[in-house]
Image (cartoon, rainbow, N blue to C red):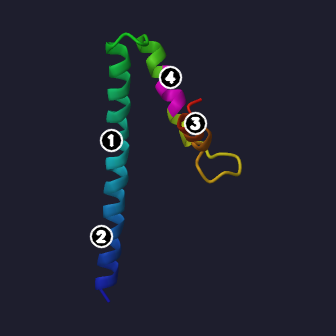
């Protein structure tokens, strides 16, 4: 009977580690994207941080009734050349 609780704890720990890794990777991705647009002079630092924060929230909000997470209109527009 001890094998099941041990296996459950292993799964719980692995999921927690994976979520922590995903969170830390997101911080690095955001920093890299902000550094790129600031170093090239496309945006000022304050605007780059605000833009990244807005897009992080915007892209994670679920779409109204669509299953594409809000990405469908962006994908269709880029594929059609608009």
Q: Which mark is residue 43?
A: none
Q: Position of residue 42 (x, y in %)?
A: 41, 12
Q: Nearer the viewer, mark 2 or mark 4?
A: 4
Q: Nearer the viewer, mark 1 or mark 3?
A: 3
Q: Is residue 39 magenta?
A: no
Q: Are marks 3 and 4 in contact (CB under 8 Å)?
A: no
Question: In the rendered image, which residue does mark 4 sit on?
Answer: 51
Question: In the rendered image, which residue does mark 3 sit on?
Answer: 80
Nearer the observer, 76 or 22: 76
Query: Label 1 to label 4, Cα distance in Å?
Result: 19 Å
Q: Badge 1, how many Cα within 10 Å: few under 14, some, many 20+?
A: few
Q: Which mark is residue 25?
A: 1
Q: Position of residue 66 (x, y in %)?
A: 66, 51
Q: Are marks 1 and 4 in contact (CB under 8 Å)?
A: no
Q: Which mark is residue 10?
A: 2
Q: Is residue 6 above or below residue 82?
A: below
**Horizontal placement of 69 versus 43: left or right?**
right
Magenta segment: 50-55
């Amino acid at each position: 009977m001890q094998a099941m609780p041990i296996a459950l704890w292993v799964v719980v720990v692995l999921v927690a580690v994976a979520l922590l890794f995903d969170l830390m990777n997101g911080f690095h991705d955001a920093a890299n994207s902000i550094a790129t647009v600031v170093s090239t002079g496309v945006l000022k630092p304050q605007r780059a941080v605000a833009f990244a924060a807005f897009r992080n929230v915007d892209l994670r909000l679920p779409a109204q009734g669509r299953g594409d997470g809000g990405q469908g209109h962006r994908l269709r527009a880029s594929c059609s050349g608009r």
